[in-house]
Amino acid sequence: MTLHVGVIGTGAIGEDHIRRLTTVITGAKVVAVSDINMDHAKKIAEKYEATCYATGEELIEAPEVDAIVVASWDPSHAHYVLLAIKFRKFVLCEKPLATSAEDCKKIVDAEIAAQKHLVQVGFMRRFDRGYQQLKTIIENGKIGDPLMLHCVHRNPIPGPKHTTEMSIKNSVIHEIDVLRWLLGEDYKTAQVLLPKSSRLAENGLRDPQIVLLETQSGVRIDIESFVNCQYGYDVQCEVVGETGTIRLPDPATAIMRSQGARSYEIFSDWSDRFIEAYDIEFQQWVDAVKQDTVKGPTAWDGYVACITADACTEAREKGTIVPITMPTCPDFYAK
Ligand code: NAD
Ligand code: ISE
């Protein structure tokens, strides 16, 4: 059976996921697309021989659509995910699951009421070969207990409507999720330091920012978020343990010696840097949905990430260390 997928949002990543589902992933076909930018959605629909729906709501309701990918702007996610749950359809929602913890909670409650795991959040770094290697090394005790993590998340330029808050909720949310998964524990406190801002940061954007997180067992994490770094897309992570350290590998690119310099290419954005992770994420999602389930990051993971991001926002605004109170994970989501 071929899984019939509908994609809401045909912008940068939506179009890339449609290409992926069509040319890379086996067992799925994009049958429907929708975007508030109808002109673009129509072009994509034509290119991939899909039906273009006037609204995301119509797409979700359409009987031909078995499962949904939400790749529209962050504030629209919660509405579409809640509607997908109402129609008992599987939904892979790009991160963040919602822009407020309150909306994430509504999704969690709706999924529990449906008594079926339908939601997966697009935290694709969990599928990245490098992060998986870090997790295996940690779990095998090869560096003892992790004590400190030093992370970097740089984008060359921000999106058109990027805000200071989005640097955490839209960008650092990846670290918030993947480090919690890596360490297997929740966070206890959050703090945000604001260094001197880059003169290239426009419209009052505070950039860079340094996020400091502390886990429940006392592991200290620093994450540099710099959305205006100009030179490329750069994600780094070093874990310092009791008996050794491990570092996320830079993706393999050829090293060139030329004109008196040794150099290698740095990717320009996420789409190439994490291409393999997205491919694995989507193949596993399609395979699981065809088995009538989902196995990737859950609505609970999306909720916890949003609670943490909200604490970071509060910490930045108040200039203090903010305690993070995590709700108890319901049995429905307990592994
Ligand atoms: P984009 O601006 O290129 O595309 C978003 C599209 O959504 C636009 O075409 C816009 O018209 C459409 N849209 C906005 N509101 C809508 C609504 N209510 N209904 C239907 N369509 C709507 O942005 P993007 O970079 O493609 O990001 C899209 C989403 O994917 C965001 O939530 C972003 O956080 C996420 N994202 C995730 C990753 C990742 O690494 N996992 C990378 C990039 C983007
Ligand atoms: C973007 O939306 C993503 O999710 C990318 O993975 C991230 O690196 C970037 O900062 C976000 O804006």
Image (tube, rainbow, N blue to C red):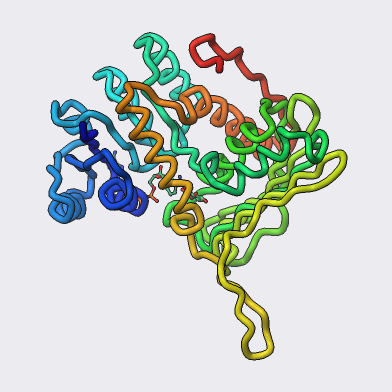
Instruction: Give x and y (percent) for residue 108.
Output: 44, 18
Instruction: Give x and y (percent) for residue 195.
Output: 72, 54
Instruction: Give x and y (percent) for residue 102.
Output: 48, 22
Instruction: Give x and y (percent) for residue 172.
Output: 58, 44
> Is any atom of residue 79 visible in this view?
no
> Is any atom of residue 75 visible in this view?
yes
Q: Identify the residue at image location x=41%, y=47%.
A: 279
Asked whether 278 or 268 is in front, the reply is: 278
Image position of 117 (left or right of 244):
left
Q: Identify the residue at image location x=54%, y=39%.
A: 126
Say which quadrant the N terminus sits in: top left
Locate residue 280: give its quadrant: top left
Marks counted in the figure total 0
For this orientation, the residue located farthest to the right is 243
Q: Identify the residue at image location x=46%, y=24%.
A: 299
Where 24 falls versus 97 (above or below)? Answer: below
Say which quadrant the C terminus sits in: top right
Where 96 falls versus 196 (above or below)? Answer: above
For this orientation, the residue located farthest to the bottom is 259
Q: Identify the residue at image location x=73%, y=37%.
A: 138
Asked whether 3 or 140 is in front, the reply is: 140
Where 24 falls versus 90 (above or below)? Answer: below
